Image (cartoon, rainbow, N blue to C red):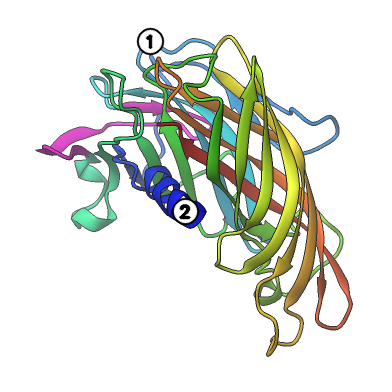
Amino acid sequence: MFEKRIQKSRLRAFNVKPYVLSIFLLTTATNSALAEGKVTHPLPGDPLIDFRIDNCDATRGFASIRYATDKGPIVALSDLCIDEEKGTITSVETREGFTLVEKSRHGKTFEVIDSDEVQGLRTKVQLIESECVVDDPDDVFTTNHFFASKDKFRIPSDYGANMLGYTIPSFSNKPKKSAEEAVPMTLIYASQTHLPQKTTEKLLGVGGQFRGQLSVSGNSGVFTITEGAGVTVGDAGGTIKLKFRENGEVMMSGQLTAKNQRLAGHEPGEWITMTAEIPYMRGHLLGAEGDQIYGFGIADGSFVDTEGHTHQFRAQVRFETCLF
């Protein structure tokens, strides 16, 4: 019975009918007549960027951006302001000049038509509808942005960047449900970019998906990790504390432990056990009824490999669940 509930919750969490926003950016735009934001560093003495936009007259959103560099990926966080009428998206990487080129019952596509003759290489924004916030008259979009390497970036990138996020048409400060089973959290893009230790990229494959239970009381909540999701991570544990703010933001922090689900036949240097702290994760309680929690942050940790060596890392963390 419990397994059936896990399967049902998994479908709710990932069968999200998003207006998925895929953006391929090939040009550098000016910032005239756009929403304004500022770079903040939420962790004192840490290079992590969280780009904040105080005022947005269009569709608000939030995202995590991954810059691909020779030393490894660098993760930053950013508010979004998406103005479909003006064809602009303000963020830590602001772009403009989009035209509506496709529209269907499932979404629409915007492109910067003169950015390239080849459609697949143009600066592109795709919106695909989402079913997660079921009681809200406005659609929530999950966003997936792809930036071309020839573009210019706030953080120097050798191979371009991509951004994953969501829009915030409405929000709540109280979840619709006080508990949810099989909530997923993902740890990806392990890197040592800001660390003195250098492990080969092949061996930095630490990470995976975690499952657990979410309980909420008042303006606080706790996500208790109970297991891995059957891909890479086996036994797992830890807790993530959530704080719900009046403006719809959800602040999260905590720690986790994990074991590789493979029991034998490891490759040399493969990770066996992992511990990590999540010092900063920001998200939102989406929908006027509090139907969905979505957020991004970072994890700082270490893993022990097959030879008993310890490797430090920083990774991106994504938290997402539908509360039906």
Residue 1: mark: 2
Q: Is residue 265 above or below residue 276?
A: below
Q: Pointers 1 and 2 in contact (CB under 8 A)?
A: no
Mark 2 burial class by Cα count in 10 Å: few <14, some 14-19, many 20+: few
Q: Is residue 104 magenta?
A: yes
Between residue 321 and residue 153, name the one nearer to us: 321
- Quadrant housing residue 305: bottom right
Q: Which residue is denoted by mark 1 in the rendering?
A: 57
- Quadrant housing residue 281: top right
**Mark 2 element type:** loop
Residue 51 x/y as whole percent: 60, 27
Chain-order first, disc 1 or disc 2: 2
Q: Left or right: 100 with respect to 192?
A: left
Inter-mark Cα distance, 1 to 2:
47 Å
Q: Nearer the viewer, mark 1 or mark 2?
A: 2
Mark 1 burial class by Cα count in 10 Å: few <14, some 14-19, many 20+: few
Q: Amino acid at mark 1?
A: Asp
Q: Amino acid at mark 2?
A: Met
Residue 296 x/y as whole percent: 59, 38
Outermost residue toward the front in this view: 1
What's drawn in magenta, residue-wise? 88-109
Residue 71 x/y as whole percent: 69, 62
**Mark 1 element type:** loop
Q: Left or right: 132 with respect to 218?
A: left
